[in-house]
Amino acid sequence: MTVMNAQDIRNKYLKFYQERQHKLIPRAPLVLTNDPTTLFTGSGMQQLMPYLLGEPHPDGVRLVDSQPSFRAQDIEEIGDNRHTTFFEMLGNWSLGDYFKAEQLPWMFEFMIDVVGLDVNKFYVTCFIGDEANGIPKDTESGDIWKRLFKEKGVEAGEVNVGSEADGYKVGTPEGVKIFYYDASKNWWCRGGKIADMPVGEPGGPDSEMFYRFDASEHTTAEKEQYGELCHPNCDCGRYMEIGNNVFMEYVRRESGFEKLPAQNVDQGAGLERIAAAAIDSPDVFKISLLWPIIEKLQTISGKTYETHTNSMRVIADHLRGATFLAVDGVSPSNKEQGYVMRRLVRRAIRFAFDLGVEQNFLEQVVPVIADLYQDDYPEIVKNRENIIETLVKEEKVFRQTLRKGLQVLTKLGADGLNGEALFTLYDTFGFPVELSTEEAFKQDIALSADWQKEFNAKMAEQRARSQTAAKGVFKGGLGGQSEIHKKYHTATHLMYQALRQTLGDHVIQHGSNITEERLRFDFSHPDKMTPEQIKAVEDIVNEQINKDLKVSFAEYPTEVARGEMGALGAFGDRYGDTVKVYKMIADGLDTPFSFEICGGPHVDHTAQLAEGGKRFKITKEESSSSGIRRIKAVLA
């Protein structure tokens, strides 16, 4: 069998499930405009949560997609052979339709027969059960896997493991293919833990799929780092998780857990990891979506991947992630998504110094990334020049920062440099510590004996502050469905239309974020708004609130909604064949004040926004990035 590249695997997967009556749905953007709980789309299921929780999906009960995802939590940890900030999740869903008996054989067929993975290197995990909560062992999934292996001539043994810690005692016994783990590994719910699930919360067991790259057990060094024996959930890299079948099977009641009347399937498989398994390499950077970037880095630097592995991995990962953020309308800035994007680009440039590449770097690499995805993501073709221009501009800005950093370093280093000074250079001036220490060596500037310890302590303080701040982003809960969220979603629609009436039709939404304290809205406009314009927008919104517009929605074919009906949408959003359009209209009128595509929660009447004597008030208007303004507003 011919070895499939990543692009082929993606397309084969989508075709595989479409042939099984699944509707192909468009990807969500990396920045979800109506999810206040997270900066980025971090999983394939994120946009499907309302439907997994019971809302009917306009495209039916069988769905499939490939969802680009981004996780920024561990940017500084990138460099090993299998983790990336940007990745694609191949997902399929059953919303109350088929269940385990169909899902597991289909995934086995796709992995073994379509992709061509070696069944002898394929392993699975299942849920061992939870006696305290009366949830039985998922023997149904185990029995299905056992039958599937047997059909391929493999007698699949089973073992009860329990926790991850128990796994290091159990290891991988000869002939065992099916491993039963506890709820810390093989149970899905939004809170993460069975014990924390509130009444009414759905959850269920999952069955993960792994590929094993090396049959040997832990070396002495690995035993010290990970544990005595290797097992599927070990983090040494010998096993790589390539997919997870989540079965939303139960709901928590006052009396305990009971079966859901409509049970859902949520499957997510990592494209990059499946592609690595297909070429039987534990290094995801050698797959067809990453290796051409590495090859370009080798060409322009004259260095090899073998001698500069870590630097090339960081650069390839970060620039791929930054490229897709640019595709979805993010620009480098000092706030939220833009800040993360800026970190990616600047870290990539920093590691390029290690390769000896000090100018015209991104304009050579970003086109390679665009070429890798343009056949499957037409939005890259459409925005190609803007993407390249955005990232190249950030490189130029950062190189100016580096020059300023050198001047500050020389000044601070007059009496030597300690860790606190190095952190100031890093945090305030964006000057990487590696460059600081290298420059100190060049200029014969002394470093304090404990500079590294001092620097790490300041970094730890910064991470603690970041984690505390991040809690504010997530505290709205996954659904963001509280009454105040509904009010701010509704106010956002009114403000969008008021901005267009006040400033002009060039105003297009470029993102929004809603918490229980305020709404935030990014939009295209070249100039700072005047106080008169801000007041005009406030007056229009409050007038519509007082008119008590009726709020309702209907579903329309996308082309009709966006075309002849003129529904507004957010920049960068992609839609399926049908969309949900919210209308806000006064009694007795034929023309709505607001007519906008949206999936967020809303109130029924705009007068609800004025409850308690509240009025709409813009608290801040500022620049978000070049040509993009940002408004923050409250109901107070």
Image (tube, rainbow, N blue to C red):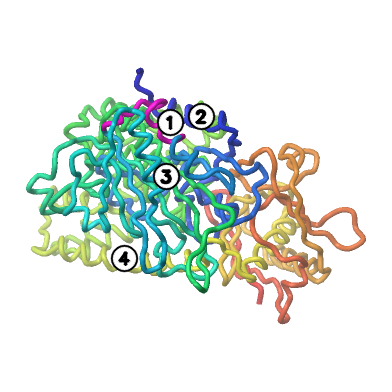
What range is drawn magenta here? 106-120
Q: CA distance from mark 2 to mark 3?
A: 41 Å
| Residue tagged 3 | 394
Q: Residue at x 34, y 39 (%)?
A: 146
Per the image, the residue denoted by label 1 is 110
Q: Which label sits on residue 64?
A: none
Image coords of residue 25 (percent x, y): 59, 39
Give the residue number, with chain letter if any, for mark 4: 462
Q: Find residue 53 and report its horizontal and vertical position in percent.
A: 57, 57
Of residues 213 and 389, the one drawn nearer to the viewer in this rendering = 213
Q: Choose the circle earlier in sequence order: 2 or 3.
A: 2
Structural distance between the alpha carbons of marks 1 and 2: 8 Å
Labels 1 and 2: the sequence-earlier one: 2
Q: Is residue 569 magenta?
A: no
Q: Nearer the viewer, mark 2 or mark 3?
A: 2
- Please identify the residue farthest to the right as the structure is shown: 588
Can residue 249 be seen from the camera position used here?
Answer: yes
